[in-house]
């Protein structure tokens, strides 16, 4: 891992998987990143640096790959981590947000007591595609708090998800783009 540029280093370990989860999709598999602790540490440091000077009271990670980096980002920022999960996965009282998918709909939820009213919450996920899940997460957070911004490892810029998110909060950051 001697490549100096962080984006190049990250791209060099991301695995492309053809036809996953369905034919015609080129899946960007971020799990190999976890095999390189130094790279992971550099990524978390850079993600935290991207939000320097912005008031962040908590990081909310979107299930499930958003947890991998989101909890480390929260730790680096020394703020709480909030789990956003699919409906029916959290044991205590929750608040919910439903949204439309390509084929059908989905609901995400968060423990009601996980979000402090009026706090500034950074939303994190591993990959930004069309932005639908991140928009739903923002709507969920806004039921009690403010969206401080959005953080992603990967932004698939050709799908223009960041354009939609910037209408909610103009602070949308990613480490790498395709």
Image (cartoon, helix red, strand yellow):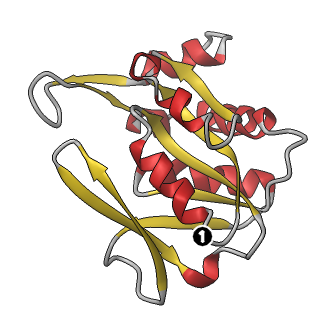
| Residue 163 picture location, percent across and down | 54, 27
Q: Where 161 sits versus 99, above or below?
A: above
Q: In what element is the residue under mark 1?
A: loop
Q: Where 126 sits versus 20, above or below?
A: below
Q: Which residue lies furthest to the right in this view?
A: 53
Quadrant the C terminus occupies: top left
| Residue 126 picture location, percent across and down | 48, 40
**Position of residue 74 in the picture relative to residue 20 (left or right):** right
The residue tagged 1 is 143
Q: Which residue lies furthest to the front in this view?
A: 167
Quadrant the N terminus occupies: top right
Q: To which quarter of the image does residue 29 belong?
A: top left
Residue closest to the eye, 162 or 154? 162
**Position of residue 15 in the picture relative to residue 102 (left or right):** right
Residue at position x 54%, y 29% from top?
162
Tag 1: Cα neighbours inside 10 Å, few (<14), some, or many (≥20)? some
Residue closest to the eye, 56 or 49? 56
Q: Residue furthest bottom?
A: 92
Residue closest to the eye, 80 or 171? 171
| Residue 79 picture location, percent across and down | 77, 63
| Residue 32 picture location, percent across and down | 40, 33
Residue at position x 48%, y 89% from top?
93
Q: Residue furthest left?
A: 23
Residue at position x 72%, y 57% from top?
75
Residue at position x 59%, y 67% from top?
82
Q: To which quarter of the image does residue 54 belong?
A: top right
Residue closest to the eye, 23 or 135? 135
Number of numbered discs on residues: 1
**Position of residue 107 in the picture relative to residue 13 (left or right):** left
């Amino acid at each position: 891992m001697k490549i100096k540029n962080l984006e190049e280093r990250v791209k060099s370990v991301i695995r492309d998987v053809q036809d996953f989860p369905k034919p015609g999709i080129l899946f960007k598999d971020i799990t190999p990143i976890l095999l390189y602790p130094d790279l992971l540490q550099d990524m978390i440091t850079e993600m935290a640096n991207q939000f320097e000077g912005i008031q962040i009271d908590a990081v909310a990670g979107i299930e499930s790959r958003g947890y991998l980096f989101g909890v480390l980002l929260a730790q680096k920022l020394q703020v709480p981590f909030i789990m956003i999960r699919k409906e029916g996965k959290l044991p205590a009282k929750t608040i919910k947000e439903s949204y439309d998918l390509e084929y059908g709909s989905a609901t995400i939820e968060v423990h009601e007591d996980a979000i402090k009213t009026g706090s500034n919450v950074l939303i994190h996920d591993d990959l930004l595609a069309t932005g639908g899940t991140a928009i739903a997460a923002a709507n969920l957070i806004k039921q009690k708090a403010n969206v401080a911004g959005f953080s992603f490892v990967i932004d698939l810029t050709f799908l223009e998800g960041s354009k939609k998110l910037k209408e909610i909060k103009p602070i949308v950051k990613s480490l790498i783009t395709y």
